[in-house]
Amino acid sequence: MRLDGKVALITGAARGQGAAAARRFVDEGARVMLTDVLDDQGKELAAELGAEYCHLDVSSEDEWAEAISFTTSTFGDITVLVNNAGILHFSALADTTLADYQRVIGINQVGTFLGMRAVVESMTRAGGGSIVNVSSVEGLGGMPYLVAYTASKFAIRGMTKVAAMELGQHGIRVNSVHPGAINTPMVGEALGRPVDISPVGKKVALRRVGQPDDVANVVLFLASDESAYCTGGEFVVDGGATATHALS
């Protein structure tokens, strides 16, 4: 049981990568608090897994305080935080409205900041912990039509390193995970229609699109004591997409 005794809070856990991480965490012995704004799906998954669920809009400072309080009163001090919640918005730079830009930043970037800040006291009290921030390959390199998303994911990458430097003295490790093309509903929802992303898989070294479990397995490693000497790091889960460059 690789997470035996751990108390984990996962954002955006009702489906996709967050749900996959929640399943792996429960299987490995963690006590898990699923959080999301998709309450029906979140509650159903929590009941299935024997976990708990709490509504959480990650862009809300007040809701973070409530989620932390509920988790600690239910399970005890938090030792793992997975900042997974995120949204995607496609538009050309010239056509991106301020409202759309701020909406993406508010959830992806501000939500991650608020989450890290919110767990410091609990993790310090517990004697340490692991924060896993889900960035993206767009946190390593830009992509056209994703100015807001790319900005938010680069910010997560940078905040991770600052937090790692500050929190290491408290035994708190902070790392970022950078998924590539993963088969989740996010792309289709951003475009407003179902999207087959399988052709993207043909462009990467492993010749396939990633699955949520591919990301969950790396998140599990970072949450566990197996990664005890890893902090401030960037862990890429992209099938080899960033192993090359545009001229290839």
Image (cartoon, grey):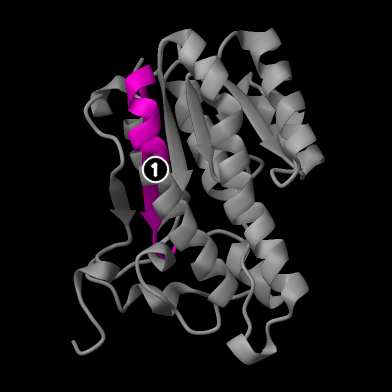
Find disc 1 in the rendering and name its residue: 162
Tell me which amino acid carries mark 1.
Answer: Val
Residue 114 x, y percent position in the rendering = 62, 39
| Residue plotted at (45% across, 31% down) | 24
Residue 4 x, y percent position in the rendering = 41, 11
Q: Is residue 47 magenta?
A: no
Q: Residues within 10 Å of mark 1 (few under 14, many from 20)?
A: few
Left or right of residue 237, residue 93 in this image: right
Total marks in image: 1
The quarter of the image holding the C terminus is bottom left
| Residue plotted at (47% across, 52% down) | 156
Residue 68 x, y percent position in the rendering = 67, 23
Observer-nearest residue: 183 or 10?
Answer: 10
Q: Is residue 223 visible?
A: no
| Residue plotted at (44% across, 73% down) | 198
Left or right of residue 118, residue 208 in this image: left
Residue 218 x, y percent position in the rendering = 34, 41
Q: Which residues are magenta?
A: 162-182
Q: Is residue 72 visible?
A: yes
Observer-nearest residue: 214 or 147?
Answer: 147
Left or right of residue 163, residue 237 in this image: left
| Residue plotted at (40% across, 53% down) | 158
Looking at the image, residue 204 lies above or below residue 176? below
Task: Label 1, secondary structure: give it.
Answer: helix
